[in-house]
């Protein structure tokens, strides 16, 4: 029933595999499953950042990237680091504004010193998230992919928040999909892993070279655990998503809360678009805490400190509920200081709401 964990660094000569940095049967089992789910060929990486870095490292120098202004801070920090060394330049965009984003892409495509060649990223990259992390804005993936391709840009979508069960970006025109498998895919807060998926054989092969040369390979045991996580993804996602939807609905009416963002809310700016391109609204809720007499950041931190069932922690997508003030991180200073990101787990929703209510009472 289960593929074995293949613990080896080398193989007998004459076989398909030669060295442990280039392949492993346990990786392949996970990659087949992820490829089937996303509709492409998958490659497993040591972390989500390993997958992100491998994709961005394929861009010829000097590269060009358009990325969401509220994209995952690891992606933005990587871009800033590489840009600081003269290897690329990037522009940020408000991804939910399709016309404005494509206008920035057009400016990028027309800039001087455009890289030559026809390989991946030679004309630039549009890097998308939808929903975005942590503001949960919803981008029109099909329109942005089509528009970017007309301008000569390739398109990458970070699909960590949605998973392939809720959204399939390759079907909507993306060239590459990346995930932090650490999150919902593995689902138990015990694995660090990433994955990239594409339908382009040239991109797949180039990513495999990057993975081997940079050494961003996953451990066989981690890959086996991630594959086990995939087997329960559907039921975990169903429960966590139902909890997120109910918590979002109740938070909207709470006197200590403002600006609740969850695409499943009929009042959310991204609700209609999410309903068109997703089969569900996800497991993440963002909201701001409002407390008279307390600074926004202090009010939010008071809530985080007061939860008892939820856990204050930096991650998402596990079976346990996590909550965090994202503005506590240096790379997130542009976010509202009172913003909390909540990753709904699979606990009883009434227990979760009781916990949030008592924590919010502390901030009043």
Image (cartoon, rainbow, N blue to C red):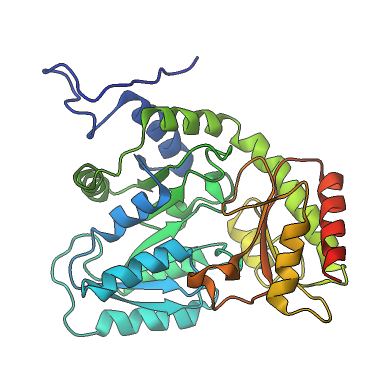
The answer to whether 254 appears left or right of 321 in the picture is right
Near-viewer residue (111 or 324): 324
Which image quadrant: the C terminus?
A: bottom right
Residue appearing at x 19%, y 60% in the figure? 119
208 vs 298, left or right, is left
Residue 101 position within the rendered picture, expressed as x and y whole percent measured from the top left: 45, 78
Q: Residue at x 41, y 71 (%)?
A: 67
Residue 60 visible in the current orientation: yes
Image: 173 above or below 3: below
Residue at 45% x, 69% y: name it.
Answer: 144
Q: How many marks?
A: 0
In the image, is 210 to the left or to the right of 163? left
Q: Quadrant of residue 78?
A: bottom left
List x then y, in percent, for residue 38. 45, 44
Could you say which is closer to the camera, residue 185 or residue 165?
Answer: 185
Please say if 49 is above or below 288.
Answer: above
Residue 195: x %, y % from top left: 40, 44
Q: Nearer the viewer, residue 18 or 267?
A: 18
Kindly identify the residue that appears in the image at 54 percent across and 47 percent down: 163
Query: Does any portion of residue 145 appear in the rendered image?
Result: no
Quarter of the figure with residue 261: bottom right
Q: Position of residue 312 (x, y in %)?
A: 66, 54
């Amino acid at each position: 029933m289960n593929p074995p964990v293949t613990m080896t660094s080398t193989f007998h000569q004459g076989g398909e595999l030669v060295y442990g940095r280039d392949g492993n049967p346990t990786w392949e089992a996970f990659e087949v499953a992820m490829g089937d789910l996303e509709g492409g060929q998958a490659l497993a990486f040591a972390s989500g950042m390993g997958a992100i870095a491998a994709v961005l490292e394929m861009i010829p120098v000097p590269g060009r990237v358009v990325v969401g202004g509220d994209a995952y801070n690891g992606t933005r920090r990587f871009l800033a680091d590489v840009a600081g060394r003269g290897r690329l330049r990037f522009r940020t965009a408000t991804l939910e504004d399709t016309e404005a984003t494509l206008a920035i892409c057009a400016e990028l495509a027309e800039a001087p010193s455009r890289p030559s060649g026809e390989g991946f990223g030679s004309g630039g990259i549009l890097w998308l998230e939808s929903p975005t992390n942590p503001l949960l804005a919803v981008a029109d993936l099909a329109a942005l992919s089509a528009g970017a391709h007309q301008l000569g840009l390739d398109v990458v979508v970070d699909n960590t928040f949605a998973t392939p069960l809720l959204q399939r970006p390759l079907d909507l025109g993306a060239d590459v999909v990346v995930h932090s498998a650490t999150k919902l895919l593995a689902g138990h807060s015990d694995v660090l892993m990433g994955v990239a998926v594409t339908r382009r054989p040239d991109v797949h092969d180039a990513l495999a070279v990057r993975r081997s040369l940079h050494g961003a390979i996953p451990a066989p045991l981690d890959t086996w655990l991630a594959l086990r996580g995939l087997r329960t993804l559907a039921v975990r996602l169903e429960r966590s998503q139902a909890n997120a939807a109910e918590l979002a609905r109740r938070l909207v009416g709470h006197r200590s809360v403002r600006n609740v963002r969850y695409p499943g809310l009929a009042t959310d700016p991204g609700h209609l678009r999410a309903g068109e391109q997703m089969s569900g609204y996800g497991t993440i809720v963002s909201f701001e805490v409002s407390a008279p007499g307390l600074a926004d950041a202090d009010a939010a931190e008071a809530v985080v400190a007061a939860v008892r069932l939820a856990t204050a922690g930096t991650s998402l997508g596990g079976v346990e509920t996590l909550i965090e003030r994202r503005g506590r991180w240096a790379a997130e200073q542009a976010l509202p200081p009172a913003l909390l990101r909540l990753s709904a787990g699979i606990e009883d929703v009434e227990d979760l709401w009781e916990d949030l209510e008592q924590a919010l009472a502390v901030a009043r």
